[in-house]
Amino acid sequence: MNSNHQSSWQKEVLRVILAVSMIVVGTTHFLTPIPFVRIVPPQLPNPLALVYISGFFEILGGIGLLIPFVSVAAAWGLIALFIAVFPANINMAVNQIAIENIPHIPALYWARLPLQAVLIAWAWRYTRKPEKQPGAVEG
């Protein structure tokens, strides 16, 4: 396996991992919305609706990453979503809001904030058409 092929294969595996992760997390917004509602900043209206909306777009973005002709738009959408939900993550850290199934360790809430940048960078890898990606094999 040459280097370009291996890099392309790894990128596609990571695409599937991100997509499935987004679908799973988005689904949890509908199955157990209350933990997410608790971290929505109080300045924002209708937290439950915002949780459902963000869950919908997480699912949509995850599915979109798997469909070639919409994957670039889905990646940009996920980047926008990661930015949009960042205030909830800040609210969780600043106000030390405990969430079920997450250890109540305030340092973890703060450590979680840079994860948004990692997620944005991860989605960024898919913001160009596949043939314009570094290492793409033209055929």
Image (spheres, rainbow, N blue to C red):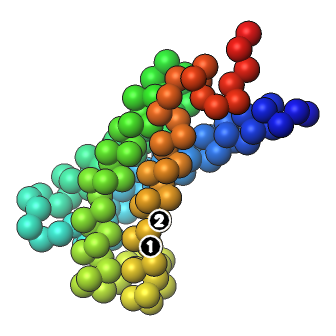
Q: Residue drawn 91% across and 33% down?
A: 1
Query: In this figure, which residue is indicated by the disc labeled 2?
Result: 115
Q: Residue drawn 37% across and 62% down?
A: 32
State whether residue 102 is above or below residue 79. below
Q: Residue drawn 43% across and 87% down?
A: 107
* Place of residue 12 in the rendered image (x, y in percent of width and height, measured from the top left): 67, 36
Residue 117 shown left or right of residue 132 in the figure: left
User: Can residue 31 be seen in the rendering of this structure?
Assistant: no
Q: Residues within 10 Å of mark 1 (few under 14, many from 20)?
A: some
Asked whether 83 or 137 is in front, the reply is 137
Number of marks present in the image shown: 2
Task: Report if the CB atoms under discs 1 and 2 are less than 8 Å apart.
Answer: yes
Q: Residues within 10 Å of mark 2 (few under 14, many from 20)?
A: few
Q: Identify residue type, mark 1.
A: Arg
Residue 139: which quarter of the image?
Answer: top right
Query: In this figure, which residue is indicated by the disc labeled 1?
Result: 112
* Place of residue 79 in the rendered image (x, y in percent of width and height, measured from the top left): 38, 45
Asked whether 116 or 18 is in front, the reply is 116
Which residue is situated farthest in the right direction here?
1
Asked whether 70 or 63 is in front, the reply is 70
Residue 60 shown left or right of residue 69 in the figure: left
Helix, strand or loop at label 1? It is: helix
* Place of residue 102 in the rendered image (x, y in percent of width and height, measured from the top left): 47, 79
Q: Residue drawn 24% across and 84% down?
A: 95
User: Can residue 107 be seen in the rendering of this structure?
Assistant: yes
State whether residue 50 is above or below residue 36. above
Q: Identify residue type, mark 2.
A: Leu
State whether residue 53 is above or below residue 63. below
Helix, strand or loop at label 2? It is: helix
Residue 4: which quarter of the image?
Answer: top right
Which residue is situated farthest in the front direction here?
134
Distance, label 1 to label 2, CA atoms, is 5 Å
